[in-house]
Image (spheres, rainbow, N blue to C red):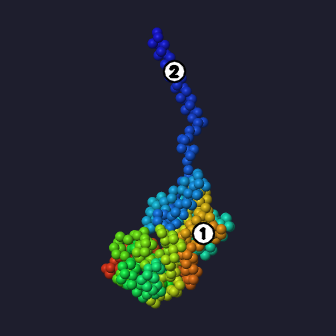
Amino acid sequence: MQKKYVIALTSITLCLIFLFAVYLSSNRQRVTVSPIEAFNQKEKISFISSWGAYDSKSQSLKSILKKLYDKYPYLEIEDSSMAGEDFLFILKTDFASGNEPDLFGLWPGSDFNLLVEQNKVADLTDLVKSDEAWYNQFKEATWDYVTVNDRIYGLPIEIIYEGLFINKDLFEKYDVKVPTNFEELLNAVKAFKEVGIIPIAYSETPEGSYIYQNMVMKLGGKEDIENPFDEEGQIKPCFVEGMYYMKQLYEAGAFPDRLLYIDDKKRNELFVNKEAAMIVQGSWLIGYNKLSGDDTTVDVIPFPDMPGGKADTTAIIYGCGNGIFHISQKAWEDPKLRQSCSLLLKELTSPENVGILAGGSGFISNIELGDYAPPATVLSTKGEKLVENAKELVGPVDSFINRGIWENIIIKRFPNVLKGTMTPEAVFDEVYAAMK
């Protein structure tokens, strides 16, 4: 009897549990269950620039991003910035794989143009022009660098230049004349070689080619550089001649030994550590490692004149650097990401934050900084004078030739040219074949 009672009670209990479960199931739409993590989720914004690692603006960028994180705690900025030649490769790979960043820095040139052509960069025209004060803070002339078919695809905050940086103290110590032409440059190379100083810090990398680019610029002038191919599709003579002059320097012992093992970082350090007398670099070298803006032992001058060169003695390579910020089209199409990226874009281009980037480096601001302008340094002042005195401002040489061709043929074949196993003409035959 007791056993039957237990069985009956158990059956009734199970029925009640079943009915209650059915009731909950039929009313589940009224119940919202959120994981605890959902209350603390942040919106992630991916960002990349070439201002990472050993770049002179790396620490300034980190401090700005930290400040923005504190100001907007609901945003998580994933910074993948890196210095050197890997930056562009990673950026292009990310775009090609559909993993593009939300916000990124990129200089003008063929890579930027291709991304715009592929509809992978957001049109910022209406965004920036909707705020007159924001739009007007940028120098009018620099809009050309980021405008395609009358539409704006980036906001430029950085002006760059290239020149011949020299360790003045080494020139004075060994009584070597500062070169103003190629013959004097060769003489300086021989003089430093004799005393065991590397004459010119150089690497066989895209960034190492600044010396070649400056030679070509002095040989061809603005017209030939910014229009590198003639009507028949042949490269202008200055590009071929520049390779022969590079070979002359190589044969004179101008460059470090074991070039294969010299990367961008090592090349810069050879100059900064006084192991090399000269380096052809950009304004971003100022502030690199222990090269402070107030270093009086360093000078920056226009690259020496080349035999028969078309460029003015004061001519320099000049333009906008990696400090052009863009929003990817993929991020733009997400309303929430668009709003957050637009907010960060305005912050990154504000006088306050641009002033931080300009502090202690060779960064020339493209906007009026007002009270946020950092104190002028010895080298930043020299750089600005270089720009001010230039009668000819020429765009970066590698921005007028397809980047793939520049890096995979012209730069890749340079070691063969220097060693005499390949002629400059043969290099450009490969270029023509690749362009067909």
- To which residue does mark 1 refer? 374
Near-viewer residue (421 or 418)? 418
Q: Residue at x 64, y 71 (%)?
A: 368
- Specify whether 4 is left or right of 133: left
Q: Residue furthest top?
A: 1
Q: Residue at x 37, y 76 (%)?
A: 256
Mark 2: amino acid: Thr
- Specify whether 60 is left or right of 276: right
Q: Residue at x 41, y 76 (%)?
A: 276
- To which residue does mark 2 refer? 13
The picture places residue 230, in percent across and down from the top left corner, at: 47, 83
Determine the image quadrant of residue 324. bottom right
Residue 230 appearing in the image? no
Name the image quarter holding the C terminus.
Answer: bottom left
Q: In the rendered image of this protein, does residue 5 appear above or below residue 291?
A: above
Near-viewer residue (27 or 201)? 201
Determine the image quadrant of residue 409. bottom left
